[in-house]
Image: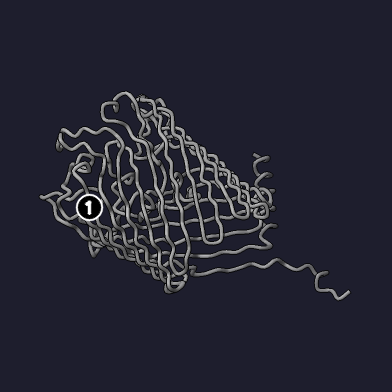
């Protein structure tokens, strides 16, 4: 008991000493987004109707930082307008999005513990899912080495999840979550070249409380010249599914862009392996971009890898983009996607005479205007031209129907308050002698 008190006093003494230089701040975000959905994520059927709604994210953040630690708490409320009565005394929308402490172990090493966001590189494998109102956060610990002078960073993260505190082992059945997770990332930058290497291990609990592990390893390589940029990306995935089927899958992506102000032209292709229909009971060749921000890829209508199944089929997404930014505050983007699957499908449920893998075409348009650093407006429209093959992967609707989606979003994200505690000057510092 006395040793614990002594340890606490020593720790408190160090914290008070570190508080010679500290800052406290409050930030906030209000982000309402209205959506019109008429074939979003899946094909529109003859018996269903388009829908419209407004969803809002509201966050407030409390931060504190001194020379030794940094603490950040960020509650959030996510709701659809009108989902609660006008007179209401309780709801289930309030959550804690961020709640972490970061301890500075050295000038280059930090340890971060608590609920936090893992978002790296282009967010293909680890992303914060910022497009979704709720976002994505992990209850985890992160060890980070970061050296700005050498432009090198190393992250090592780990998490272990349980549904509740209990006296005996309980089944972990939180939907969409892993039981345990570890990842390693190494990042290095040079004058015109940079790369990131990533290894991710996901362990999911089975009904008998055993674990099935899937590993993802690979990296992203980028070349940046004056007006030209190229990137190459590749990941390999292996292990076992929760049904004890062997996983053997991969992702390859290439992207080229050329800047000719005020225009920017982009060409690229993403290929994610899939599983042929006759083999799905015995093997898994379907790549799963587990915790990526998949809305950034594969078309804005989110037909693939965004909470909507496409029966384990692989995907080739060839795309072209034109970005137009006449002024710094404004940007218009026009995107075209061609979707193709290389896998053998079960066409008997749709049309046995359809044997081609072309899934369709998608056109996306996005307009962004940033009034101030903390105030922005965005709107977008997406239109799908599907094929009968797509109906096999999305049998809930028909490609002959109009399938489109439109949205309008206001984003207010600003710092409300900041107070800085300056270091105290010793009397000798004011002496003229």
Q: Position of residue 379 (x, y in %)?
A: 32, 65
Secondary structure, mark 1, is strand
Relative horizontal placement of residue 7, taking residue 118 as reference (left or right): right
Q: Position of residue 6 (x, y in %)?
A: 69, 44
Query: Looking at the figure, which quarter contains the N terminus?
Result: top right
Q: Nearer the viewer, residue 187 or 400?
A: 400
Q: Position of residue 42 (x, y in %)?
A: 23, 48
Q: Position of residue 49 (x, y in %)?
A: 14, 55
Q: Nearer the viewer, residue 92 or 33?
A: 33
Q: Nearer the viewer, residue 188 or 192?
A: 192
* Residue density around tag 1, few if under 14, some if 14–19, many if 20 or more, within 10 Å: some
User: Dot 1 corresponds to which residue?
Assistant: 385
Looking at the image, can residue 246 be seen? yes
User: Which residue is located at x 22 percent, y 52 percent?
Assistant: 385
Q: Quadrant of residue 267?
A: bottom left
User: Is 273 placed above or below 431 here?
Assistant: above
Relative horizontal placement of residue 80, taking residue 135 as reference (left or right): left
């Amino acid at each position: 008991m006395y040793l614990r008190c002594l340890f606490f006093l020593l720790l408190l003494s160090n914290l008070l000493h570190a508080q010679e230089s500290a800052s406290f701040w409050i930030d906030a975000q209000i982000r309402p987004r209205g959506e019109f959905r008429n074939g979003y994520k899946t094909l529109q059927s003859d018996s269903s109707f388009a829908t419209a709604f407004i969803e809002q994210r509201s966050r407030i953040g409390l931060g504190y930082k001194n020379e030794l630690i940094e603490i950040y708490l960020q509650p959030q409320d996510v709701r659809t307008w009108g989902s609660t009565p006008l007179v209401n005394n309780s709801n289930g929308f309030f959550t804690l999005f961020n709640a972490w402490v970061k301890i500075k172990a050295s000038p280059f090493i930090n340890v971060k513990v608590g609920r936090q966001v893992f978002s790296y590189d282009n967010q293909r494998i680890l992303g914060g899912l910022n497009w979704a109102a709720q976002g994505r956060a992990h209850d985890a610990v992160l060890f980070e080495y970061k050296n700005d002078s050498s432009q090198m960073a190393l992250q090592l993260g780990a998490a272990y999840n349980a549904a509740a505190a209990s006296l005996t082992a309980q089944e972990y059945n939180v939907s969409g979550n892993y039981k345990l997770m570890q990842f390693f990332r190494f990042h290095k930058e040079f004058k015109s070249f940079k790369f990131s290497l990533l290894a991710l291990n996901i362990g999911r609990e089975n009904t008998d409380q055993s674990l099935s592990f899937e590993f993802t390893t690979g990296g992203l390589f980028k070349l940046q010249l004056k007006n030209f940029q190229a990137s190459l990306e590749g990941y390999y995935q292996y292990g076992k599914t929760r049904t004890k089927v062997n996983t053997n899958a991969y992702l390859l992506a290439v992207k080229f862009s050329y800047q000719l102000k005020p225009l920017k032209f982009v060409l690229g292709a993403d290929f994610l392996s899939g599983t042929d229909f006759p083999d799905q009971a015995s093997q898994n060749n379907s790549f799963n971009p587990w915790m990526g921000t998949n809305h950034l890829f594969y078309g804005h209508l989110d037909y693939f890898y965004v909470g909507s199944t496409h029966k384990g089929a692989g995907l080739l997404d060839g795309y072209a983009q034109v970005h137009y930014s006449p002024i710094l505050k404004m940007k218009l983007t026009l995107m075209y996607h061609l979707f193709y699957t290389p896998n053998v499908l079960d066409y008997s449920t749709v049309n046995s005479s359809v044997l081609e893998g072309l899934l369709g075409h998608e056109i996306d348009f996005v307009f962004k205007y940033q009034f101030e650093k903390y105030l922005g407006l965005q709107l977008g429209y997406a239109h799908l031209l599907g094929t009968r093959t797509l109906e096999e992967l999305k049998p809930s609707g028909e490609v002959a129907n109009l399938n489109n989606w439109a949205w309008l979003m206001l984003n207010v994200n600003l710092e409300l308050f900041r107070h800085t505690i300056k270091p105290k000057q010793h009397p000798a510092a004011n002496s003229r002698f």
